[in-house]
Image: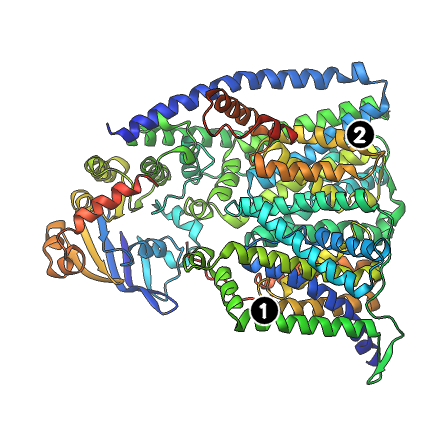
Amino acid sequence: MHNFFQFVIGGLGFGGIYAFAALGLVLIFKTSGVVNFAFGAMATVVTLTLWSLLNHAGLPFAAAWVLAMVIAMLIGGFTNGVLMRRIERSAVLVQIVLTLGLLILIEGLAGVLWGYGPKSIPQPLSGNPVNVASFLITPNDLFIIGLTVGVGLLLFVVFEWTRVGLAMRAIAADREVASLMGIRTNLYVTGSWALGTALSGIAAILVAPSLGLEPTMMDQVAVFAFAAAIVGGFGSLIGAVVGGFLIGVASNLIAAYVSTNLQLTLIFAVIVAVLYVRPDGLFGRQAVSRQ
Amino acid sequence: MLGLRGVSLSFGGVKAIDNLDLDLSDGIVGALIGANGAGKTSVLNVINRFYEPQSGSVQYDDVDILRLRSHQVIKHGISRSFQNVALFNQLTVFDNLLVGADHISRPGLLTNLFRLPKARRHGREARKRAERVLEFLDISHLRARRASELPFGERKLVDMGRALTTDPKLLLLDEPAAGMPEARHESLAKLIRQIPDEWEASVLLIDHSMALVLSAASHVVAMDFGAKIAEGSPDEVRSDPRVIDAYLGPQDAAQQEGAQAEAGLEG
Amino acid sequence: MSELSLSAARRGALVKSIRKLPLGLRMLAIVAVAIVAIVFPAFEGSDSFVMYTATQALVYGLAIVSLNLLVGFGGQISLGQAGFLAIGGYAAALLAIHVSGLPIPIEVLGAGAATAVIGFLLGLPTGRLRGHYLAILTLGFGVAIPEIALNWTSLTQGRTGLTVPPPRIGNTIFPTPTELYYFSLVVLVICLVAIFSILASSTGRAFAAVRDSEAAATAMGINVTATKVLLFTTSAFFAGVAGDLDAHLQGLVSPDSFPFSLSLFFFAAVVLGGLASVWGSLAGAVILAVIEAETSSSSGWEPVILGGAVVLLLLFLPRGLADFPYRAQQALRRWRGRKPRAAVPPSRAEVS
């Protein structure tokens, strides 16, 4: 039994990473109604930029991280402001395809610019596992968990209790109406793309030390992130965080008790199961639709 | 014969239909009138099984309609058109009509793939029906046009045509005159009046245009806030004080209708 | 008659005159393509790399048309089409290895049928899902299939993969690149005839009806869920046949043969060729195969070209390449007319 809980705790670090990726997806989806399939590639470019800042510009880690976040927001803002806005009234299919095109393009560009060999960036915190209530956990995992919970709560507070959050909720509910109410919807949507890209950038920066930094690094993480977002109902920020931790723990348990090679497959099975039984996720509300 | 008994429908506390009884005999044109939001389209959506009423029963001949799934309703002879026109936009007018005719016999994929006799027979039957509808509505010249290319008024005609191609016994028409210039209302009313004889189908008609309803229908039910407020011949309903109060009240209501219909042309 | 119907009639005549011309040209183009496809090996048959690329284009053609069936004709999404090819490929390999003397038509049908079963199962939840969820579900499927192939070693030999014998009829085997080309061409043509036959029938109309309006399709007696499941099954069948052809072309099926990027490239080709255009999809397949052949040495540029083309196309030519002649004509006419909106320069469209 102790082993089981040790595996649960061991999955929380990755869970936090999936939570960040899911947060970015959900934030963008809430305001713009688009699932950004290119988020992984965009996040990878952010991380490769961080790598360049560390290794070519010689910046200290914290400074490089801050700068990478700024670049992430520029990438996200540019993607919406210049590309997605042009097709915001098109069919869902067209929007999905554009983000897929971006996924292919950005992954390819990353390969051309940075090459395909794996690179390494350091973990935010190094150090041996510490003993917390008889369970072992690395300082880095503790950092990730703390950061996830902190950022998740911050976003929740902003979204629920501030004027900015109110505006974004209004846009999520009905963009036309929000616009008529005088809310500058384009600004907020572009802002959420910027913030969402920064959040998934954090996920990529945190996962790179474990996976090896390369252009297609996030392809696999993407499946876990989508699973986390779906479990969380694809619309709830808290759901994304909870979903992220659930998926992190579940995949660690799968690795421990089933096989390390079947993680993706079983997480896919989780997606299928959730979508079969509750198409709106474990935390989602049933959408009421009128013809 | 269609019969609704005690049908109630609400959306999160808002009553769309309130304990409605409604009967429609075979072989006639009946009409539902009422202001915007009176619950007329909701009635069609209940009969069509798009909405699940909280209480009441819907009977058509001997069939309990509420036991059916929405795509099965048409098998019992009930077909409909849509208020906002839901044509298959990327298909031609003729193909739109063929989809209507396709429910008569639905050949399987393999039957179609190998063009077995059953598939070919079905194709012939379907084309024949579609041709007849084109002729009846006088829209043969539109057959090869994509539905999305047509102006709203003609899309409404095609929508009605598609419902006719299904060989219905009961045709539900949701605002067929919307988007048509008032000058054409009379010819449309004439067309609708012919349906019971030419197509052996009764019609349940909804429209804003009082003139159209009164000229096309022989039996009228007036609704207000989801409830029935009057029923009878067009003349009776027109002179009913409650109807005048709820619907015709301001004398210029009819003129507004006309203006709306013109405005609809652009859409 | 009112102004309304007058202008409609005038527009109708215009549309007719525009459409009449391309129909003749179209038949001509089809005949030309058929002749080129048939005599092609007579000129290039000695160059096995060219023949390989040409055969790859045929295989991709079927795969991309199968995806377009789903996306363009049915309004659904699959980001896991390579997963279907994988199932078809493995089924073909297992049939060819374990059933000696199996006639090739049975093998091809078997590969298609096995894939169709999986497509049916994957299609089951799609009646309730749309848009983004469907994309994510199929993405997960496409990623999971190679992983399953990797782990089910008793059946698939894991990473080593399965060696696929060349197609055979009776005691004759067809191992040369030219023979493989004709084999793939024949299968492709049969599949295209079948697909056109389905699309022109009540089944094809039901697919389109569900795509254009689920509410109206339901009111017309179409069971929307069943139709979507049937569409997934059909698409998977043809993708499975493409997987069979691919297995014979490569001579090997392994988990690495079906990366997620392949599904994405198929999707890109559907978009490049135009939704609901079979001929556009075939053109997209040729482009994909040629880019793959030309960039295989200098790795990295293939996704840049394909992804960049998709992005540019969606922004500037949203209906795909199939729409290009029409748009170019329009642009040209505007340019000649020197109206203020001559701003869509043909050069920009040509980039994509």
Is label 2 in a helix, a strand or a loop?
A: helix
How is the structure coloured here? rainbow
Q: Where residue A11 sits in the image (x, y, percent)?
A: 78, 70
Foreground of the two, C258 or B166: C258
The label number, if any, that marks residue A283 in the structure image: 1
Q: How many marks?
A: 2
Label 2 CA crowd tier, 10 Å (few <14, some 14–19, many 20+): some
The label number, if any, that marks residue C294 in the structure image: 2
The chain carrying label 1 is: A
Q: Is residue C114 visible?
A: no
Q: Where residue C335 sits in the image (x, y, percent)?
A: 51, 23
Mark 2 or 1, which is nearer the eye?
2
Q: Is residue C39 above or below residue C316?
A: above
The chain carrying label 2 is: C
Q: Is residue B177 above or below residue C322?
A: below
What residue appears at the point 87 percent right and 70 percent down from the top-left corner?
A: A126
What residue appears at the point 59 percent right and 41 percent down from the top-left corner?
A: C71
Say left or right for B117 vs B59. right
Which amino acid, mark 2?
Glu
Q: Is residue C150 visible?
A: yes
Q: Where residue B39 sits in the image (x, y, percent)?
A: 29, 58
Q: Where residue B1 sits in the image (x, y, percent)?
A: 26, 51
Say whether mark 1 and mark 2 are on the same chain: no
The label number, if any, that marks residue C283 in the structure image: none
Foreground of the two, A236 or C333: C333
What residue appears at the point 14 percent right and 55 percent down from the top-left corner?
A: B250
